[in-house]
Image: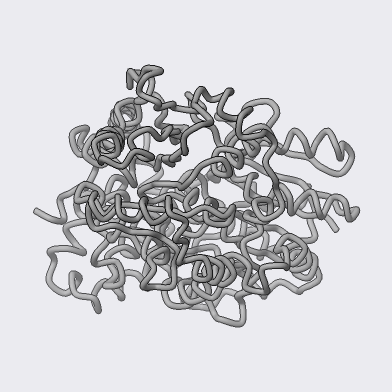
Amino acid sequence: MKILFMMTESRTMKYYHETLRFLLDGGHTVHVAYFSLEKHHKGTLHDELGQRFPSRFRHEIVPGKPPGIWRDIGIALAWAGDYLFFLRPFFKDTPRLRERVEVGISRPFVWLVNRCPGFRSPAGRAVVRKFIRAAERAIPPAWTFKRYIRRINPDVLLASPLLSHSGMQWEYLRAARALRVPTGYCVASWDNLTTKGALRGEPDYTVVWNDTQTREAVELHDIPSERIIVTGAQYFDDWFERRPSRSREGFCREVGLSPDHPILLYMCSSNFMAPRERDFVFEWIHMLRGSGITELAQAGILIRPYPEYAEQWRAAGFTAGDRVVVWPSGGEYTITEEAKRNFYDSVHHSLAVVGVNTTAMIESAIIGKCVLSVTAKEFAESQNGTIHFNYMKQENGGFLFLARDMQEHLAHLQSILKGQDRLRQQILYFIQSFARPAGLDKPCIPELARIIQKLAMQESGKCTLSAATLLLRFCLYPLAIAIRASRPLTHFKKHKSKQRRKQALRYAAQRGSDPLESLRTAGGSGLGRARR
């Protein structure tokens, strides 16, 4: 069997590395197509696969967006569809998700669906959303993508994360379906179906982790339930099996903390989820030191920075007497074996893990640690204002020690110090239902590999076009030409705006500030106008 796996960048490989190695061990061939390797470093996971399976594993960079007249209108429709996706009543309490998409939306469209009578109602927006979906189906599959798929000649084409504007993966899905190649969308992470936008491309099957994601796929993305397959979270399998690579004394010596005191591990989030997180961490450390609880006042504090936003910690100014360490100093994604060991050992040798909203909190619970958070007003939109965070709450069957304020947080830490782990059974229940629905003792990688092999033997759904779709394509053709023809006229303005946004995001990353605020200052296309 030959698998063509579309990924946006090398970081996506961390979700499927072990699964692909399992398939390669079984004699199959894997071809990975990235849209970018800009952030690639030697020693990453696909390099390891290439060295171990030189004849059956290949990776390359492919165009993320198709050439031709349909490219620009396709991009515009995708942004518009995602904006409407986050305007649905289900997301009424998640304004940050909507605002993030507003960056790529034109002012007239923002006005149309927020102010224009007839279109600003749920029914009106539903009509617009239905039209956008029909228009996307009417766009013909890119011939260059079809040619590429013919050259690779795969038995199955997979895509992940798909819900992203870093590349038009859905166009490869449509091209594959036109060639009758079976297709599958693999959900990469726990928040993909609620934070990234609308699903498009109409894959033959969607592979999800659990029943929660099944519900999201059906209710939010209108995927037929018979086209959804639950396999569990294969990405977490490694944390179930892995063991520490260093002794506690060796680990403490390496990071620069005393082994005589407990360690509290703070897992940083992205600055989209936790803007100005450094200020919050400083306040948290000050609270611990002044708590009057000897173990917390003297505890070692290990801060694990989010890789893209580690720059803000370089000027933190911690000294040896502070018993606070930022490690690894530049942050790291778990895309190398060394990075995986560092992550696991950091969690294993800590008393507890604290964070705002990050996947690492689930990973820490799997490794066996109590995970805590504080409901902070500065993170209200990133915690209670996101769907996936609520899954971790205890009242929803989750594992999180969520405090309403710092005093309650101290009480949670005290109970953990005393060994009062009252949530152990609930943690196990969450891990099973969320990550290993088939049973805690049943790895997910073999199941996902089995499903991929099964998909390759399925017949892809017929890509038939109705007369209405062909008529819509004919009507869209002049518009696509006009948009494409106007590109040279607006190129300088768009390029300047894009550079301004990049600079704003770079500024936010260096200082840990809110990227949405930076984009507002830089003048995002429609950002914030819907609220005025």
Above or below, 276 against 322 in this view is below
Residue 487: name its quadrant. Answer: top left
Give the image location of residue 100, x and y in percent: 30, 49
User: Measuring 64% from the left and 49% from the top, which residue is drawn there?
Assistant: 6
163 left or right of 435 in image: left
Above or below, 265 against 42 in this view is below
User: Measuring 45% from the left and 40% from the top, which residue is drawn there?
Assistant: 265
User: Measuring 79% from the left and 48% from the top, which residue is drawn there?
Assistant: 21
Give the image location of residue 327, x and y in percent: 49, 28
Depth check: 25 or 432 in front?
432
Give the image location of residue 81, x and y in percent: 37, 61
Evaluate whether residue 489 shows in this view: no
Depth check: 468 or 256 in front?
256
Above or below, 530 against 61 in this view is below
Evaluate whether residue 282 shows in this view: yes
Q: How many labels were placed on the picture?
A: 0
Toward the left, the furthest residue is: 532
Q: Quadrant of the N terminus?
A: bottom right
Q: Coloured how? A: one colour
User: Measuring 56% from the left and 52% from the top, which residue is drawn there?
Assistant: 169
Depth check: 214 or 251 in front?
251
Give the image location of residue 317, x and y in percent: 33, 18
